[in-house]
Image (tube, grey):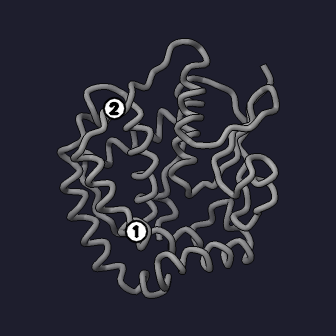
């Protein structure tokens, strides 16, 4: 079978989702990190600027992270991810911290060294676009102390929701694909105190998915 190719942004939680099944199911893949200001490449594949994008063995393209996960998981006829439990507590928590994550992470991604921000034009593109959504990056960075404290309080709420380091529910599921995709990013936040339950969960999924954390380059 021709090796599939996955186009990603390293910072993107949806791209983390799509990457996870490859190592967890021993599926060969070539990973390509697109520059954040490259509109032409993704538009030529799926008609919009978005990642992840999977190039399948037949040369066709697939978008939408969870569609990619389900496609990969079912290739061998032995899926490993149960359906989402649609937990109200977990969904409410993720919704509550959404803007907080963005305030802490958007200004840090552009100085993190990830592949999509290797040029000034890519940094400028992202900054211009996300400033419209979030407000000033410099203001968010200046408010880091209060934002980090707020996130630490929220992580204390999340910790008891995690069943074990191996799955957030009673079994491995799509909820783990979603949660690790989001939690991996917080390892970029220097000085953040992460509860041991969450830290163990992040490390476990980093190890089995082959997707590294950002502790070494935390900002």
First of labels 1, 2 by sequence position: 2
Residue lying at 71% horizontally and 71% vertically, measured from the top left: 122
**Residue pushed farthest front?**
47
Cα distance, mark 1 to mark 2?
25 Å
Q: Which mark is residue 34?
A: none
Q: Is disc 1 surrounded by few (<14), some (14 to 19) or many (20+) residues within 10 Å?
A: some
Residue 34 locus on image (x, y percent): 73, 56
Q: Considering the numbered disc 2 on the image, is that residue within a helix, a strand or a loop?
A: loop
Q: Is residue 2 left or right of residue 139?
A: right
Residue 102 locus on image (x, y percent): 44, 68
* Quarter of the image that includes the N terminus: top right
Residue lying at 40% horizontally and 86% vertically, measured from the top left: 142
Residue 198 locus on image (x, y percent): 29, 48
Q: Is disc 2 surrounded by few (<14), some (14 to 19) or many (20+) residues within 10 Å?
A: some
Residue that numbered label 2 is attached to: 166
Select label 1 or label 2 by which is in front. 2
Q: Is residue 58 above or below residue 100?
A: above
Residue lying at 59% horizontally and 43% vertically, measured from the top left: 64
Quadrant hosting residue 179: top left
Q: Considering the numbered disc 1 on the image, is that residue within a helix, a strand or a loop?
A: loop
Residue that numbered label 1 is attached to: 190
Q: Is residue 156 left or right of residue 35?
A: left
Residue lying at 58% horizontally and 39% vertically, measured from the top left: 19
Q: Is residue 194 left or right of residue 40?
A: left
Residue 20 locus on image (x, y percent): 53, 36
Q: Nearer the viewer, residue 28 or 122?
A: 122
- Whether residues under marks 1 and 2 lie with C-beta atoms below 8 angstroms apart, the answer is no
Q: Is residue 121 above or below residue 14?
A: below
Quadrant hosting residue 141: bottom left
């Amino acid at each position: 079978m021709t090796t599939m190719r996955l186009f990603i942004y390293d910072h993107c939680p949806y791209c983390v989702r799509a990457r996870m099944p490859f190592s967890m199911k021993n599926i060969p893949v070539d990973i390509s990190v697109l520059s954040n200001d490259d509109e032409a490449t993704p538009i030529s594949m799926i008609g919009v600027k978005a990642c992840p994008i999977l190039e399948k063995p037949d040369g066709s393209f697939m978008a939408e992270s969870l569609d990619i996960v389900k496609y990969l998981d079912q290739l061998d006829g032995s899926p490993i991810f149960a359906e989402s439990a649609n937990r109200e507590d977990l969904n409410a928590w993720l919704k509550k911290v959404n803007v907080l994550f963005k305030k802490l992470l958007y200004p840090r991604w552009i100085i993190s060294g990830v592949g999509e921000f290797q040029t000034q034009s890519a940094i400028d593109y992202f900054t211009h676009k996300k400033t419209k959504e979030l407000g000033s990056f410099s203001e968010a960075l200046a408010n880091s102390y209060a934002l980090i404290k707020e996130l630490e309080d929220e992580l204390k709420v999340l910790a008891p929701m995690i069943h074990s380091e191996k799955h957030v529910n009673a079994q491995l599921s799509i909820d783990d694909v979603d949660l690790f995709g989001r939690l991996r990013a917080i390892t970029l936040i220097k000085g953040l105190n992460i509860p041991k339950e969450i830290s163990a969960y992040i490390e476990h999924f980093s190890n089995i998915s082959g997707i590294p954390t950002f502790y070494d380059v935390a900002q």
